Amino acid sequence: MSKTARCLISFAICFMLARTASAEGNFITSDLWIRAVIHTVEKGGIEGVWKKGGEDTLGQNRVIWGYFYADPNEIRWGNPQNPDVFVKVWFDESGRTDVNFFHVSVPDIEVYSDYPYNGVPDRSGRATTSTRYIRHCYENGGSYGYENKEDGNPAQGYWAGAKPSGYHLMDDLKIAAVINTLEKGATEAIWCEGGRGMPEGKHKVVWGYFYADPNTVSWGSVSNPEVFVKIWLDANGRIDVNFFHVSVPDIEVYSNFSNEVTSQYSDDIFYKQKGTTVTHKRYIRHEYAYWYASWADPDCSVQNQNEYLYETMKYAYLWNDKVPETDVSLYSSPDVLLEHIKYERDQWSYIASKEEYDLYTIGGNYFGLGLGVDYDVYDDCRITFVYKDSPAAQAGLKRNDRILEINGKTVQEIEAQDLWDSVFYKGRIGDAVDLKIQDSQYQTRRISVKKDLVEIQTILHYDVIEYEGLKVGYVVFNEFLSDALRELDAVFAYFSWKGIDELILDIRYNPGGSTSVAEYLGNLIAGDRLEGKIFAKYLYNDNYSDWNEIAYFKKPANKNALNLNRIVFITTGATASSSELLINGLKPFMDVILIGDTTSGKPVGYSFSWEFCDRIFLPIVFKSVNSRGDGNYFDGFSPACYAADDLSRTLGDTQETSLKAALHYLKYGNCPNISYRAEKSAKEKKTIKLHGFRGEIGAF
């Protein structure tokens, strides 16, 4: 018999042993009383129905848990398998009693407790979507309360880096938890499914909890939940995976939609979303779209794929009101259809292979050579950067090398036929790309470089520069990937230790990435003084207005924040998306100076990856604005000083034109004299424009 099967049997027995409810509220023990009142739109306040889940004695401690749900006789969405408030009561050996309430659903819910019971509630509170956790404590004859404000994001400063085997809850959805214990270190938690329900409409619910393995730690028990979980499968095509931290240890939580990500190049198990729940950040929410989940028995005919993409665009697309009425049967593929129906301003919605997309978003890898390419100010095609340990690096390619031919085609032919999106990418690992190169010594040579799996280097260079009495931190940040958090922490710890006066953030090649990484970096730059201020608002179309979100500046978990009043960004036409989000988010609160060239202009983004037939669809679904409501920067941000990307010098060379101009501005407050072709906007400069998935990676 499986652990999950045993868990369900234990759970059913616990339900039969539940105590009878009083007219209002419920006795958990003979002298502990609790109550929940659910505020509904339809009927106002209704009494929550109590379900006891389990009880156990752990040494001198005792635990009782269960949940409240809405009465189906009162409200149409009420269901015994649709928990609205999870509850865990802990009777500590010290004499303290903790009554923990965890808000699960949409309505506001009043919670009460009384101990010892005298008919008048000692403690009360209102659990909401922002106040997810309420704790009532009884100790030494008195009581006190505590609550957490929660936004669903994981705690910063904690690294969830395990690879737990996890549990498949259905064909495409997998979850896991790892409990960080004092006794045994990190240990994988055991899943116990509580039930599945179908509230009104076509919604579905799966819920349960993780507990510590009793074979690993003494306090592990099937009746001692460590993390409650409720999964909501919305009829409109969204999955919410909600984790609620119950106990004391730090607990890492993981989820993945579409099974574990594996390929012929890696046996590692990855999870698309992860984070650490802690006592001050108890709630983590992962969101997915599942309109084309495998359990929906997808038909991968072109007609069905076209219909799926079209319906997604009509419902979830940011500009859904601009999508024309279309006969999808007239189009030979969803790719062709997308190009026809997307809004004229949209340069970014795309379809990618699932394997490549997962490798990039989860592992920070892609298939290629590991180099950036663009035109210099004289319209020569040159290498802008090379990732360390990449095939390009192993072949000896360097920044400033001039590319004359690729696979027998001249750069002029590639440009004329608009082949930049494909010229490097056809073929698989091990396939050769033939290049004709002219190096910095004007020596021409032909080399063959074999494609491989490239690990993206999020930070290309960092240093502290002593410049005319200023101590300036300088970092070249190349991609807003989740793996960058540890590297950013290390760099800012170094800057803090060095006591820098100013910061130059070089994002000249940064195409964007995760908005949460942009928020994290904003906190490192701004420090404590902006805590509670709005960093950004993410706004969806009217169909998804309940997804609208506000991201606030937060106090960094570590001590490496800089508390700066101004910052210099080095930018180019390749600076996009989360890079511009960071610029826009900081602008209302500090002096933000741009040096280099006009940014790309992408004030919109993706939230979910719609999967269908081993492909991933990424439509633009939200726009971002800052605390002043400023957004719509489709023309990009213009620099205070135009300066060339000086490819003749290495990144970090203080004589490199852009860095030199940035240092000059920090010292003197004006632009240096620059008298050549860099003094024109990115819209005029010849550039290589990558599209779709390749634009996300920003490298070849």
Image: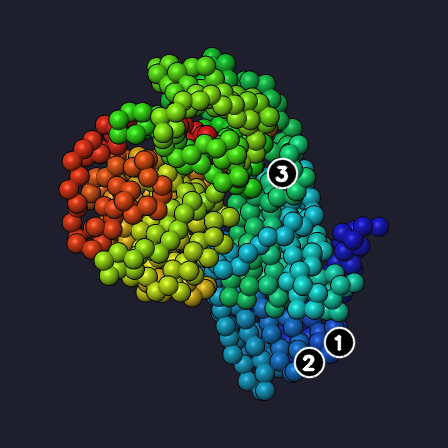
Here the colouring is rainbow
Amino acid type, residue under disc 3 in the picture: Val
Name which of mark 2 and mark 3 comes first in the sequence: 2
Measure how far apart labels 2 and 1 are at the Cα level. Answer: 8 Å
Residue 74 picture quarter: bottom right
Please rate how many residues cluster around mark 2, counting C-alpha atoms within 10 Å: few if below 14, some from 14 to 19, many from 20: few
| Residue linked to disc 3 | 261
Q: Are marks 2 and 1 in contact (CB under 8 Å)?
A: yes
Q: Quadrant of residue 603?
A: top left
Residue linked to disc 2: 93
Q: CA distance from mark 2 to mark 3?
A: 44 Å
Per the model, the C-alpha gap separating discs 1 and 3 is 41 Å
| Residue at (36% x, 31% y) in the render | 440
Which residue shows up at 60% across the image and 45% down it? 271
- Would you say the residues marked 1 and 3 are in contact, meaning their CB atoms lie under 8 Å apart? no
From the viewer's perspective, tell me whether residue 341 is left or right of residue 54. left
Percent position (x, y) of residue 255? 60, 47
> Which element is circle 3 on?
loop
Placement of 482 over or under 22, stated as above or below: above
